[in-house]
Amino acid sequence: MVLLPMESVSRVGLRLTLKQRYFLLLCFAVGAIIAYQFTRNRLEVERMSRVEGLRANSSQFTLERKPFHILGGSIHYFRVPRGYWEDRLLKMKACGLNTLTTYVPWNLHEPERGVFNFEDQLDLEAYLRLAASLGLWVILRPGPYICAEWDLGGLPSWLLRDQNMKLRTTYPGFTAAVNSFFNQLMKKVVPHQYSKGGPIIAVQVENEYGSFAKDEDYMPFMKEALLSRGITELLLTSDNREGLKRGGVKGALETINFQKLNPNDIKYLDGIQPNKPKLVMEYWSGWFDLWGDLHHVYTAEDMIPVVTEILKLDMSINLYMFHGGTNFGFMSGAFAVGIPAPKPMVTSYAQPLPELPSHQERRAYQPVVIHQHLSLWDSLHFTDKPLKSERPVNMENLPVNNNNGQSYGYTLYETTITSEGTLNSKNNIRDRALVFVDKHFVGVLDYKTQELALPDGKKGKRTLSLLVENCGRVNYGKTLDDQRKGLVGDIELNKRPLRDFIICSLDMKPGFVNRLESSGHWMSMRQRPSFPGFFQARLYVNSFPKDTFIKLPGWSKGVVFINGKNLGRYWSIGPQQTLYVPGPWLHKGDNEVIVFEEQETDGKIQFASSPDYGMTVDVQ
């Protein structure tokens, strides 16, 4: 399901915190127990011709018919700047781990139907080759659903253009899309299997389907989708204790996910799958954070006894996550289990852990002053042509992005009103709307606040504007089919539905940001800015760029772009108080910083050399 260590890592030096000392102890203790055995096995496998890959035919895994213990860690290539892939994998290997696990995010690899991207940051084959070159095995988790606290669990939003869509089932519209994606993905994956000289020793069938389980034919379909395209390595499934009841599929080894070890759960796994090796596919080494909550910390003191017991039971283990990274852009998901309304997840997928075997320097650059601004209203002519529609249209069904709809960001809905009164959202706002009358801010509508009094004003026609933000689609649970965003139904004024909208997509993709940067419409800060708006500054770097963290204590809520790349969302309600800026995304000289801010600014951007995840609470 879910977890998060370390977008940034503390230096290993003389002054280690207690937590760092414990984690170092954990790393080296585990490494000492198993490193010799695994290194010996790896060298033997490399020296011989490959005959038999990973097998689960007895109570212990075998590789080349010799006992093999999986000690894995999850690092997602799409959450780590490509320039740091090698560094992060070396850190994992330095902790004695022998297997890399990663998800594959369908929504990044196929952003528009039939348009595939496996380049640069998304070069999966380069990532697999890197793992192999460093002596790491790979367990690949290709989805198509990945959960991962990632928008819609990695499923592309254009699937939701079909009003009858049933995600994660054998609904023809879904299976056709999966088949098309897997046709492309498996061409990249198959050559990197163990049997072909590559590092992939196992492939996971879907992900945690037992917690969803709406279609008994779906998992057999997904298994066949892998086998028919040339997957020959060991197949696995992954579920929590409850999900084990319905998440398996014949021919795939069932594995378990948890944070706290319950002996009864292990007995249950043994009962449904006797005389098979046991793998904790996700040992949750952290927990996700939600905007407005506290930052969750899972202490090393709590981790060590659990990991020790898992190893004593001769079980294999995968740390989820070993290194969490960052939900760059608008890609973080939302949580909706057991609460009345979804709560969006923060940008960071990390908690600090010590850095091994080396460290990247980080720098707190001097604050920079905003020198230009551009109002939201003046930015609209850099967007796609607006849609005129009698009724509201949700963002996924807008005729933009080659008729794939809008996936992320904000959507502006405008209509004409002729009276004041009470605006009622009818709970049709997904997820949060800033409301304006004639460009003057009058309030916020969201899941909690569904009514707003519009002020008296001039007689005659006025423009009502709703800037609706998609705060992140739910990534886990049974509401995936309901994750359309924007206005998903009528909005009423004085109990009468509003009509005749002009709808503008503000997905803030790189092309839009580049057009903003080069436009001549920016205004000096000597002229009072209006909100929402874009604010521009330059960060001058006079030497080799270092990692840094942006702090915006005098700002409210928005998004930060640096050199055209979307760093993600910030929000003053916390817990997260900084945004990670990877050194490889900066360059020597001037770096362009653009901040989209909804409501307020103090006119400067600050930098820190370490992250601030906010007030903490221990994971219970």
Image: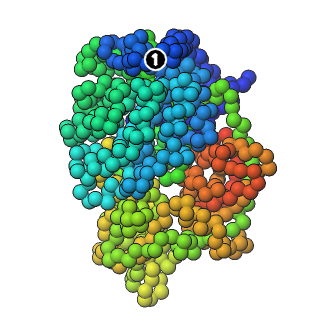
Residue sitting at x 28%, y 16% = 270
Label 1 residue SS: loop
Residue sitting at x 37%, y 71% = 423
| 338, above or below 252, in the image | below
Three-letter code, disc 1: Ser
Tell me where residue 140 appears, x and y as whole percent: 42, 33
Tell me where residue 515 appears, x and y as whole percent: 59, 68
Q: What is the quadrant of residue 357 in the picture?
A: top right
Tell me where residue 491 appears, x and y as whole percent: 34, 70
Instruction: Describe residue 493's horizontal placement relative to residue 214 as left or right.
Output: right
Instruction: Describe residue 268's horizontal placement relative to residue 316 as left or right.
Output: left
Residue 20 in view in this figure: yes
The number of numbered discs placed on residues in the rendered structure image is: 1
Crowd around label 1: few <14 · some 14–19 · many ≥20 (10 Å): few
* Front-lying residue, 177 or 330: 177
> What residue is shown with label 1?
49
Hey, which residue is sitting farthest right in the picture? 542
